[in-house]
Amino acid sequence: MSTVLAQIESQIAKLSSKAVRKNTGIITTVADGVAKVSGLSEVMYNEMVAFPGGVIGIALNLGEDEVGCVILGDVSQLKQGDEVQTTGKLLSVPVGKGLLGRVVDALGNAVDGKGPIASSESYPVEKIAPGIMARKSVSQPLFTGIMAIDSMIPIGRGQRELIIGDRGTGKTTIAIDTIINQANINRVGLASGDPKFRPVYSIYVAIGQKNSNIVRTIAALEAAGALEFTCIVAAPAADNPANQYLAPYSGAAIGEWFMENGMDALIVYDDLSKHAVAYRQISLILKRPSGREAYPGDVFYLHSRLLERAARLDGKGSLTALPIIETLAGDVSAYIPTNVISITDGQIFLETDLFNQGIRPAVSVGLSVSRVGSAAQIKATKQVGGKLKGELAQFRELAAFAQFGSDLDAKTKSQLDRGSRIVELFKQPAFSPISIELQVVTIYALQKGYYDTADLKKVTATSVSIREFFKARQDALLTEIRSKAALDKDLEAKIVAALDAWKSTAA
Amino acid sequence: MAAVPAKIRAFVKQLVQLSLVDARVSSEQVAGILEYLEKNPPARPVAVLQAYHRAIATEIAKGEARIEHAGSVTPEALSAIAAALGQRYGRPVAAQASANPTLLAGLRVRIGDDVYESSVAGQLAALSAAS
């Protein structure tokens, strides 16, 4: 007992006698998650302020007579006359590998019930994006595992590629497939022991979604074994708008830790439309002037400063961003969609019509683009899939013409048939990403006519059969394709031999 | 409490400037202003007076150091604190002491929006918040 008392006495003796200065204010009003505070004369913009009861806020409106603070926590305890103090700190979140496999809220607190986050570092939520000289061109591929995207709209590490479409067109599915594919690639790469292999860690930021959707996403990632390489930042619809506003920036801070420490990361913002709505709500409550569609004047800056933080750094790592935007009735010329389209390095446009026709993923190849393009493709994909986009474009033009049912010449019929087969080939079930070596084999088989004899409705099943054959019996060949990343004559001959072997077994 | 319109804020700011003598709130000046406002009531007189009241309270708080202490504090110590604060803020500061046993030991000084915490209770609270 005397030891215990001695410990307490020594702790008291250690207490510094130096005075600590704090700047304070008094709450004048609390409403809708925002507190108006008089005083706080030395508070800085975006500074964390401390309310009674351990509640945290951020000073967002610095007025002459009062400060508008967004409250990040339980507002029910706060009342007029409560004292507010500055903290001298910017809002930060814990970062590091300890967040992998965890679900956190916008402030970095664990919400998955698995105990506190193991982290020794924290990064500020708001940070200036890397400058021009710190960056490097995007040249390393990031494989989504979705054939339609990897062959025609390739994404590179450090790129920002927007996924845009109406509700229920498969935007989140594309993002989840990409995360699962990174996990699959990570497992293979880490098992190979290749010192040059760079795993990609994923961050999924859920903004304004239903809790049931978030649970379903977590379950899908867990079932695919992807959760161990993924951190989830959850700001569901039931969360206050301040947390929904901060969540993407917290996710970006977590991703920046990987990037700054020489690793590669992927971040999905699902979705930025809800993020803009949350920011609009906060701005209107703070009485900021509203503009088009009642959004505040800086709604472009809201997303530009977020997405500019995704980059490939020279001598360090990369952060690839897949922001998601939901359109209404396919209107890509609306305010927020056009803003984000102009910021990102390309878009994957999903159409409801294609989805309803059974073409899933419902990627509109005509409207989708990757501004990085083939710089982010391995040579093998360019060799087998370089002409696909052009062939599909011809098919779309001819398909409209063929609807009139007039007699068609042989060449037109063959182009229509080929286009239909390409469309069938690119159909892919959800949560089933295909490795790049299997994609190369699948598309190579198309180029060499291995699907020409199959019925159109059986093209998808035929491609599945080819991939199953190669996975079961041609593992060494797949490894060779993956490591060489280009098709030379020798490798092509081996693939043809393997495809012939498949054909004889399938006959 | 509704937001104060910009015109009223600007008017009250002028009144506060007129209420100061040597950077201190002068009771004679304030009485004169109140007399003027009574004879020449502005639009929304209640809102103007409420805003004026808050602004003058803030000005008074800037010139007054409320020193909470646990245990005894000598008048010399209070004068030294007031002088040090006056030097720091560049304006005359008057010290007002009050006993607060909950501090356990040490002092807490409030002047305007600033709080200088040098009490044991404050540091224990900071320790528990950090853990």
Image: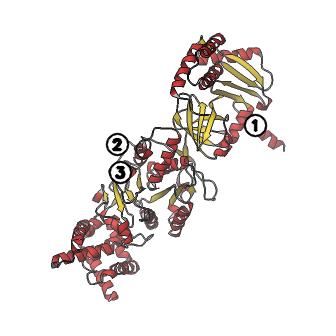
In this rendering, position of residue A164 left or right of residue A237: left
Spatial CA distance of label 2 from label 1 is: 52 Å
Spatial CA distance of label 3 from label 1 is: 62 Å
Point out the image quarter for the C terminus of chain A: bottom left
Q: Which residue is mark 3?
A: A338
Q: Categorize mark 1 by other alpha carbons within 10 Å: few (<14), some (14-19), many (20+).
A: few
Q: Is residue A461 visible?
A: yes
From the viewer's side, name the closer residue of A278 and A123: A278
| Local SS, label 1 | helix
Q: Amino acid at mark 1?
A: Ser
Chain containing mark 2: A
The reply to whether dot 3 and dot 2 touch (C-beta < 8 Å) is no
Q: Which residue is mark 2?
A: A132
Up the image or down, A266 lies above or below A60; here it is below
| Tag shown at residue A195 | none
Q: Which residue is mark 1?
A: A10
- Residue A88 is situated, as x and y percent measured from the top left of the image, at 57, 34
